[in-house]
Image: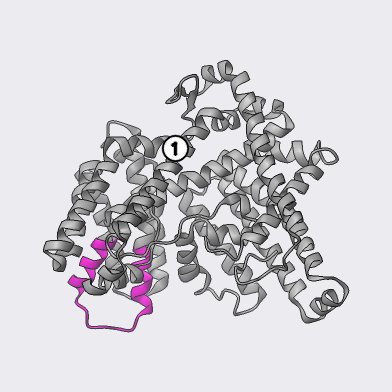
Amino acid sequence: MTSNPNVHWAPLPRTELLVYWLLSFGSHLYSFYELHRFSKEHEAGLVRQFPLERGLFQGFKRDASDFEWTFWSEWAQKSLLWTLIGHAVVSRLCSVFYPQFQVAAHTVYGLLAASSVLGLRGVAVLLLHVALSFSVAQLRRPALCWTCNLLLLCTLHVPPLQDIQRGWYERDEEYYLLLFSVAVGTLRLLSFSLERCGRPAVHTGSFLQLCWLLSYTFYHPFFYNGPVITYNDYVEQMQTPAEDGDRHKPGARYLLLRSARILMWWCIAEYMIHVMYMHAIQSNETYLEILPTWALGGLALALVQFFFVKYLVLFGLPSTLATLDRLVPPGLPRCVSIMYSFTGMWRHFDKGLYRWLLRYVYVPLGGSHHGVLYKMLSTALAFGFVCLWHGGHDYLQCWALMNWLGVLVETGLKALFGSALLRSFLERRSSAATRRRCAALLSAFSTAMLILSNLIFLGGIHVGRIFWKRVFLQGWSTVAPPMLAFLYCFAQVGLEWAPHPP
């Protein structure tokens, strides 16, 4: 059940693998078709309750119930897409005519772009956070840095401050943009502060450090939504000599192909919310209860697949622009349909956040090098921080707890089957192909719990509760076995694909 990409599983017969691929692909298509049929049959009722807009495709409505996709799509059309293009133009002009001022240009442009959207008072809030975090970082005490930045993060949930900040804007969407900027900015401020604490004393002036922090915080492509890179990586990559950076800079062909891929992902995401109203359906318990079994499976797959495609777009465009500035952004998410473990999901979906948690939470607290208890504590606090960073709501607590338990169980099983005694016994008693099939069978159960936790994260506790009831309680003999069989096929495809780079 390991998700280690360095593990090479025994090859299976080509016919067997072909069956796994066909069953995986076919089950996706058929379950999506059943969800599409249910969506069209209940379209009239859904229109009365949820924001189903006039679609881009004739004869289809558009499900605008996914807040995040609708929010970023509207902002992209209104201003963000144009400010990102402006960043690319400024960056290109500076790299050609004034390469020595490129970092300063990024900082000024980032501040101006943020001011145009968040307003002067919104940027003032961010600058206040920068000033406080920078001041505390000079004390070089990790505990104080964590306390300061967590308190700043918690100000997002203080009702009087919320009322004041809402009053600055005419629409809630503008206020939400400030919240997202502060939340993502907290990760950058913590990265700077903890790197400052961990590095030996240097004679770099405080003013220069502050300038780098402002550049890192307001770097426009990553400003609102990430992906996340650490402060050290940002500074080192930005300081790459122009000659070396130009040697590794993407060419026009790469940028054209990358842009075409992002456009394709956007089209896929839009097509999904035109033909399957999964976000509207998940918001109504009555529809969740009456969904046919195949459509219920299609809903689960569609929700997690849409989440994956959505972040290919949301991370893909900023990452492409960042490569123009000699930055090396984290890799894009790996397809969730070939994720077969909790550990793999965390390692390969949001790779920037994973590395951030590993560097600043998991490893400093002991990680896997100081025994089982330290590993359990480090993992628990990493998930606890992610829960708090996302808002700390009850469904997030449930999601974080499930992920923590999932990772612990997978780690325990990996240690058990990796022990010398059991490993030698299994090698004597079974073939490598049989061991792979057993790993896929265990991974099917892990994948079922992984999907359940993601449904809670994406839809709330009520979605997870109904899914659990219909699949594992009411359908323990009729629904759960075929579902686990299909998940076994998914796991085999994932094991086959694991050695390939994401």
Residue 70 in the image, given as x and y percentages of width and height? 42, 34
Most distant residue in the front direction: 15
Q: Is residue 196 magenta?
A: yes
Q: Which secondary structure class fits the magenta region best? A: helix
Say whether residue 214 is magenta: yes
Nearer to us in this view, 289 or 293: 293
Query: What residue is drawn where x is 42% and y is 62%?
Result: 330
Part of the protein shown in magenta: 189-216
Residue 377 visible somewhere in the drawing: yes
Query: Residue 420 is drawn in which quadrant?
Result: bottom right
At x 30% / y 73%, what residue is drawn? 236
Residue 376 position within the rendered picture, expressed as x and y whole percent measured from the top left: 63, 68
Helix or strand or loop: what does disc 1 sit on? Answer: helix
User: Which residue has dot 1 on it?
Assistant: 267
Q: Is 174 placed above or below 485 here?
A: above
Residue drawn at x 31%, y 31% as measured from the top left: 171
